[in-house]
Amino acid sequence: MEGYEQWSRLGWQGICMDVPATWCPGRLEGDYANGYLRVEDEEAVCLEVRWETAGRRVPPASKLVDKYLKQLRKKTRRSSRDADVVRDMAIRRLNHLDHEAFTWNGEFAAHSVLAVCSETHRVVHVRVFFQEGKTRKSLARKIFGSLTTAPDDGQTEWSAFGFAFRLPSAWRLEESGLRTGCLRFLFADDNDQLEVVRFSLAGMLLRATPFTRWFRETFRKALKKYRFDLTTTEYRDCPAVRCEGVMRSMARPLGLFRRKKRLTALVWHDAATDKIHVVRLVTTTVDDPQLEAVAASITSD
């Protein structure tokens, strides 16, 4: 479609869509309630997503588009020519959402969809940019048609750079790092902590360091407060390390009166993709099944 043969899933803060595989996140701001995501290729900004959480009574999508276009005209009233606006378009695959698709062609050109999610009370606005005279209607419709704005069966999908996983929607993102060679996501749910990491170029990382030692050294800071045991095993037919531990008493204020914090981690080296995947969970729940569920959901290119 329009020269894009390979596509990948992009998922962030419960908002997911299919995008060309050559497009990558360039800027990320905000949290689950309100935020901004910019997606780029090698030449320019291709897509933007903005979301905000409204009150209990959210205006219809058509009214929100009215307001957006009014504000946009004020900002661009000094333009050398009037903007061309096409409205009242619908995306068949978004019939479950109150939405309106429209095109603005003025100082910038973009196909947009504005959707209201009754489940989360969020307003999501997605824009696909194009150069004047080079409309991207079919591309935009494919992207818009793949849009989801709420967790699926209580699970939130996270996906970037070919790395995807799912976890219960109660987990909220605390930190993230999307740098070359390492994708890292740190989540919190009350006092529990969940970390999901993917390392690239695994063969190079492990070339002179045994797998178990590499894990100890790389996660030294996360492990130092725990008494733990490491076990070599296999996971998904890949070499793996399992970690089980309990927080040291001296690391817990009033430790004798608090529930023990338990550490579990699963690390595996997928030689076929040259990746190392890590899932680390800190919780007070004994035999918590969440680590295994998140690990099982991971897919990676």
Image: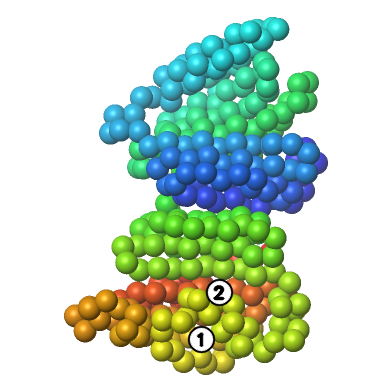
- Rate crowding at label 2 as few (under 14), some (14 to 19) or many (20 or more) other CA atoms within 10 Å: many
Whole-Å distance between the Cαs marked 2 and 1? 10 Å
Give the left or right position of residue 213, taking residue 63 as reference.
right
**Residue 249 image point, x, y percent:** 30, 85
Residue 87 to residue 10: above or below: above
Q: Is residue 273 visible?
A: no
From this view, report whether residue 261 is shown above or below residue 210.
above
First in sequence: mark 2 or mark 1? 1
- Type of amino acid at the residue the image marks with label 1: Arg
Element type at mark 1:
strand
Asked if one can make out residue 156 in the rendered structure from this viewpoint, the answer is yes
Residue nearest the observer in this picture, 255 or 194: 255
The way the protein has been coloured in the rendering is rainbow
Res. 140 image quadrant: top right
Answer with the quarter of the image where residue 285 lies. bottom left
Name the residue located 65 percent from the left edge and 42 percent from the top edge.
39
Task: From the viewer's perspective, tell me whether residue 41 is left or right of residue 47.
Answer: right
Q: Which mark is residue 9?
A: none
For the point 21% across and 84% down, the residue is: 256
In the depicted structure, whether residue 49 falls above or below residue 212: above
Q: Are marks 2 and 1 in contact (CB under 8 Å)?
A: no
Q: Which residue is mark 2?
A: 278
Residue at left 32%, top 84%?
250
User: Which quadrant does the C terminus fall into?
Assistant: bottom right
Count residues near mark 1 (Cα–Cα under 10 Å), then give few for <14, some for 14-19, many for 20+.
Answer: many
Q: Which residue is mark 1?
A: 242
285 left or right of 106 in image: left
Instruction: Say what amino acid the circle numbered 2 marks.
Output: Val
Spot occupied by residue 220 in the image (x, y as percentages of width and height): 53, 80
The image shows residue 254 at horizontal and vertical percentages of 22, 78
Which of the 4 image quarters holds residue 87? top right
